Amino acid sequence: MKTFKQFITEGVKVTDSLVEKLRKKIRIDNGKKHIINGVMITFRDLKELPDLSDVIVDGDYDCSSNNLHTLKGSPKQVHGSFNCSWNKLTSLEGAPEFVNGIFYCNQNPLKSLEGAPEGIYSFKSDQFTHQDYLKYWENKILKRSIDPETNDLFGGMLDTI
């Protein structure tokens, strides 16, 4: 049997058993996959997330305090808060499309908000403020509304927004 110190220092990798435990929590509702009561996979020294990219989590999703470099595999949506703090993320690529709660990403070496989900209640980070997040999405929506021909008229300057 492992000692407490071994358990804490060795952690648990994404194994078939972890994926199986999460998959057993999935319920189908109106043709969509849901996990009820949230997901907590913290302090496991995970280098990657189990693939829940086609799943909606009804509750909080917490993958903080791991060794993640990407959020690839995150749930499609989280109907609660999302916590990816204390990892090694440089961007938010792979984050859920939608988080109906607080999005925590403290203590990561983030270089940009690229990949940040749309429509969150509040954004918490030590590198970027909630105002930075709102400006990021305002600019992203503006870019979507400008057709490529208009951008060409401005010599591609609108790409820098």
Image (cartoon, rainbow, N blue to C red):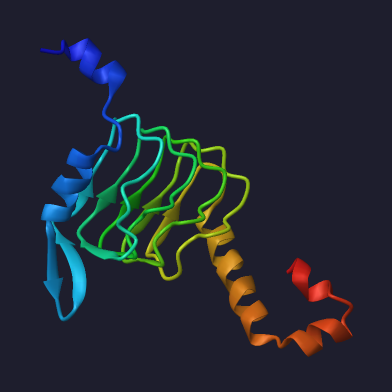
Q: Taking 130 as reference, is 20 left or right?
A: left
Whether residue 29 is situated above or below residue 66 in the rendered picture? below
Give the quarter of the figure containing the C terminus. Answer: bottom right
Give the farthest residue toward the front.
16
Q: Is residue 24 left or right of residue 60?
A: left
Image quadrant for the N terminus?
top left
Residue closer to the observer: 134 or 15: 15
Tell me: residue 30, above or below residue 41.
below
Residue at x-position 17% and y-position 54%: 23
Horizontal and vertical percent position of residue 158: 78, 75
Q: Tell me the residue at 44%/56% (across/down).
A: 123
Residue at 52% x, 60% y is 115
- Please give the name of the residue rendered at 60% of the width and 65% of the height, measured from the top-left corner: 136
Q: Is residue 134 left or right of residue 18?
A: right
Quadrant of the image occupied by residue 16: top left
Task: Give the quadrant of residue 118.
Answer: bottom left
- Residue 102 appears at what percent x and percent y? 35, 56
Q: Nearer the viewer, residue 65 or 74?
A: 74
Q: Position of residue 29 (x, y in %)?
A: 13, 75
Q: Position of residue 101 (x, y in %)?
A: 31, 61
**Quick check: 145 above or below 103?**
below
Say above or below: 33 vs 30: above
The number of discs equals 0
